[in-house]
Amino acid sequence: MGITDLDVIDMAVEEDGRLKLVIVDSGTGYAPEERLGKLAAKFKAYLRFLYSPIFKKERPNLKPDDVSIVVICSKPPSKEMLQITKVIPGGEKAVRIPVEFRKG
């Protein structure tokens, strides 16, 4: 679990017909640029999941644009991280997955 584990969805919470995918970021052990790079890689892993057959099978009532990503940060996010307010899947210009940072 965490920003280095790209094969795991850290947590998923469904409420009011929407799905929140959670990323847990301890914020420790990495230089700011490295932390941002690892977070970007985790976002890409989550996007791959959203467009996978597994997502369609596990959540048949949801589409990728019914999803948001919440990043729980033990250490405050950097200014660069806070500039990320959405992720856009490649080739899906109409879909924007909202991103929110929370203290954890």
Image (cartoon, grey):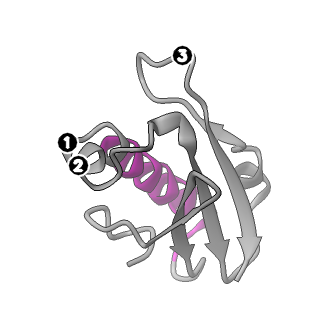
Three-letter code, disc 1: Pro
Viewer-nearest residue: 34 or 15:
15
Magenta stretch, residue numbers? 30-48
Three-letter code, disc 2: Lys
On the image, numbered disc 2 is attached to which residue? 57
Quadrant containing the C terminus is bottom right
Residue 93 is marked as 3
Label 3 secondary element = loop
Specify few, some or many for label 2: CA neighbours under 10 Å numbering under 14, 14-19, or 20 or more: few
Quadrant of the rendered structure where residue 51 is?
Answer: top left
Viewer-nearest residue: 81 or 90:
90
On the image, numbered disc 1 is attached to which residue? 53
Specify few, some or many for label 1: CA neighbours under 10 Å numbering under 14, 14-19, or 20 or more: few
Three-letter code, disc 3: Lys
Name the residue: 79% across, 55% down: 79
Nearest to viewer (mark 3 / mark 2): 2
Q: Is residue 93 magenta?
A: no
Nearest to viewer (mark 2 / mark 1): 2
Quadrant containing the N terminus is bottom left
Looking at the picture, how far across and down is residue 22, in whole percent? 53, 67
On the rendered structure, is 33 left or right of 73?
left
Name the residue: 67% across, 83% down: 74
Label 1, label 3: how far apart the Cα atoms are? 21 Å
Quadrant of the rendered structure where residue 102 is?
Answer: bottom right
Q: Are marks 2 and 1 in contact (CB under 8 Å)?
A: yes
Label 2 secondary element = helix
